[in-house]
Image (cartoon, grey):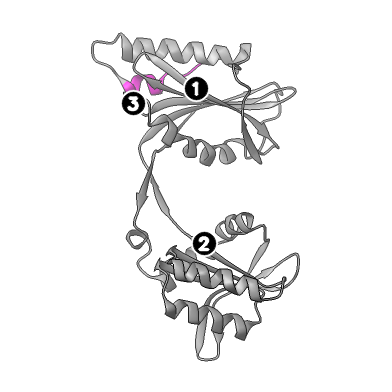
Amino acid sequence: MIKASLGNLEKVELREVWKSEASDFTPWLAKEENLLRLGEALDVELELESQEKSVGPFRADILCKDINTQQWVLIENQIERTDHNHLGQLMTYAAGLKAVTIIWIAEEFTDEHRAALDWLNEITQDEINFFGIEIELWKIGDWEIKAYLQSAHRDELPDGYLVRTRPFIEGQLSTAEGTKPAHRIGFVILSHGAISNWVMFDWWSSLHLYQRIFQVEGMPPDRFVAGPLGLFQCVYDLRITAFESEAWRKHVVENPRPDIQAYLAAQLRIDV
């Protein structure tokens, strides 16, 4: 059993985290893992070529290469509302670098700048693409989640199972926040079955236990799909839920002085 601190999502102003586009946001976006996420969103495989790439007397934020086509990809950042200056920079850099994929990232796009990108996509050749992406920043709050890894394969614990599942579960916390009272306490079962793999996210609200169950595609997980209506748990997963139920009853529900930390410290001491 592993205890993990997760959190509910709270929106944060971009300038609170990235004070400067050039010295803060651009280096963050240029990291391999962030370019990977950006590429997945646009169905482009990106490889970093340069930050602050010279274009005559000017500097483009990020230049990448599309690994599949070997063509140049330009990324221009703006951690505020779009403006004409950045639109002009985008066109200047794209022309100077011969980019065929042009990505403009901003906190908010005006209707006029959305229309400008649409028009550019209409009048340019098919291999040239303009993308406008709005970025939002969210903060993880204060959930405490126990994580169980339950495997039918005694000697095989899939690499990356928990790592890939964690951000997915964090994305489910906004749903869990809707249950009242919201204790922000729960547990996750990562089931590595003989035939299929499942993730169960359970959270407490007073006397009640809520659950979402998802089938896992790929291992490490590539995708999480909502489980069939009515499916609860297999007999081995039920051992974990029974233990957690008893621990919650003992340390919280029937305790004159509810002790959340004692509940979190309680561990199922069998091989699951």
All told, the count of numbered labels is 3
Quickly name the residue at label 3.
183
Magenta-highlighted stretch: main secondary structure? helix
If you read the primary sequence from the N terminus, does the residue marked by circle 2 or circle 3 appear first?
2
Compared to 208, does 119 lie above or below?
below
Residue 164: x, y in percent? 59, 41
- As helix, strand or loop, the secondary structure at mark 3 comes to loop
Q: Which disc, if any, is residue 211?
A: 1
Q: Which disc, if any, is residue 133?
A: 2
**Mark 3 and 1 residues: CB-CB less than 8 Å, in contact?**
no
Label 2 vs label 3: CA separation? 35 Å
**Residue 102: within the magenta?**
no
Compared to 38, does 156 lie above or below?
above
Residue 91: name its quadrant: bottom right
Question: Range of the magenta residues?
Answer: 260-269
Compared to 123, does 166 lie above or below?
above
Label 3 vs label 1: CA separation? 14 Å
Residue 206 falls left or right of residue 257: right
The amino acid beneath tag 2 is Ile
The amino acid beneath tag 3 is His
The amino acid beneath tag 1 is Gln
Residue 199: name its quadrant: top right
Q: Of the residues tagged 1 and 2, which is closer to the observer? A: 2
